[in-house]
C-alpha cells in the first residue's frame, strides 16, 4: 500500500512494508501519487522510501508471467513511465533506500536525482543477467547514464549485489545513513538543490535525460 505524507516542504512516498514489487497495483499507484505530489505547490523535495527489508524487489515475475501479450507490453510501458516521470520531476527527488533494491526497483532509485542507502542493510542489484532477462533500451540507457562506466558494466554483466558502503564507493549512491537517519539525510540531500523555479527545473532535467527519454517507446 503506497502512502504519501508531507512534512513541511518535503513530500515522502512510502512504498509500504512488503517487497514493493512492480505489478498491476504498484505501477498505477505510483503514477497517481506522483500526480498528487506534483499538484502540491508547497512541495520542495520528493523522497521515495519504503519499510521493512525492501525498497523495491523489482518486477513481480508471477504477475508479469500471467499477462498475455496484449497486456504485457502496455504494463511494461507503464512501468518505465514511472521512471520517466521521476527523471523530469520538477523538484529535487531523492531515493531513501531502506533495504533491497533489485531490478527495476534499483532503476527506480536511479531515476531519482540523488540516493541515500541504509548503511547496514540491503543490497542494490541488477539481477537481469542471472534471470535471463534483457533490459529494455530505456532501462539500460538509464543505468548507463546514472552510473560510472565501470560500475555500470559490472552491475549489468555480473549482477553484483552492492551493500550501502559498497554502493557509495562505486558511485551508485550519494550517501549512506543509519536506519533512523535515512529520511532526514534524504530530505537534506534534496533541500541542497531545492528552491528553483519548477518549470525550469523540469526543462533542464528533460534536456539532461534527452537520450534516455528518446528510448521510452523503444
Image (tube, rainbow, N blue to C red):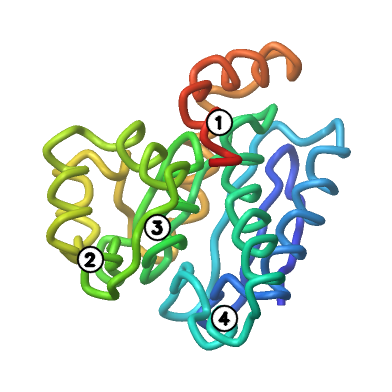
Query: Which residue, given by chain and number where applicable, does mark 3 sit on?
Result: 106
Q: Residue at x 41, y 44 (%)?
A: 115
Q: Could you tell me if the residues under marks 4 and 1 are in contact, i.e. CB atoms within 8 Å?
A: no
Query: As drawn, is 211 to the left or to the right of 12?
Result: left
- In depth, the one of 126 and 43 nearer the eye is 126
**Which tag, 1 or 2, sits closer to the chain's start?**
2
Q: Which mark is residue 17?
A: 4
Q: Residue at x 44, y 74 (%)?
A: 57
Q: CA distance from mark 1 to mark 3?
A: 18 Å
Classify 48 as above or below 40. Answer: below
Q: Could you tell me if the residues under marks 2 and 4 are in contact, i.e. CB atoms within 8 Å?
A: no
Callout 4: SS: loop
Q: Quadrant of the N terminus?
A: bottom right
Callout 2: SS: helix
**Which tag, 2 or 4, sits closer to the chain's start?**
4
Q: CA distance from mark 1 to mark 2?
A: 24 Å
Query: Which residue, given by chain and number where applicable, does mark 2 sit on?
Result: 129
Q: Position of residue 171 (x, y in %)?
A: 22, 39
Query: As drawn, is 94 to the left or to the right of 150?
Result: right
**For discs 2 and 4, the disc positioned in front in the rendered view:** 2
Amino acid at each position: 500500500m503506497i502512502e504519501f505524507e508531507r512534512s513541511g516542504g518535503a513530500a515522502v512516498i512510502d512504498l509500504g512494508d512488503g517487497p514493493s514489487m512492480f505489478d498491476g497495483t504498484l505501477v498505477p499507484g505510483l503514477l497517481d501519487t506522483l500526480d498528487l505530489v506534483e499538484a502540491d505547490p508547497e512541495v520542495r523535495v520528493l523522497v521515495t522510501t519504503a519499510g521493512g527489508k525492501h525498497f523495491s524487489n523489482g518486477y513481480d515475475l508471477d504477475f508479469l508471467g500471467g499477462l498475455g501479450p496484449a497486456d504485457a507490453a502496455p504494463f511494461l510501458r507503464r512501468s518505465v513511465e514511472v521512471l520517466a516521470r521521476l527523471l523530469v520531476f520538477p523538484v529535487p527527488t531523492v531515493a531513501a533506500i531502506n533495504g533491497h533494491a533489485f531490478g527495476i526497483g534499483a532503476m527506480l532509485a536511479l531515476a531519482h536525482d540523488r540516493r541515500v542507502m541504509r548503511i547496514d542493510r540491503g543490497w542494490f542489484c541488477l539481477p537481469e543477467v542471472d534471470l535471463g532477462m534483457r533490459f529494455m533500451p530505456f532501462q539500460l540507457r538509464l543505468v548507463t547514464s546514472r552510473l560510472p562506466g565501470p560500475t555500470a558494466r559490472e552491475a549489468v554483466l555480473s549482477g553484483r549485489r552492492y551493500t550501502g558502503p559498497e554502493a557509495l564507493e562505486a558511485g551508485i549512491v550519494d550517501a549512506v545513513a543509519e536506519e533512523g537517519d535515512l529520511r532526514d539525510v534524504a530530505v537534506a540531500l534534496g533541500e541542497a538543490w531545492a528552491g528553483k523555479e519548477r518549470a525550469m527545473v523540469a526543462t533542464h532535467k528533460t534536456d539532461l535525460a534527452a537520450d534516455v527519454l528518446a528510448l521510452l517507446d523503444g
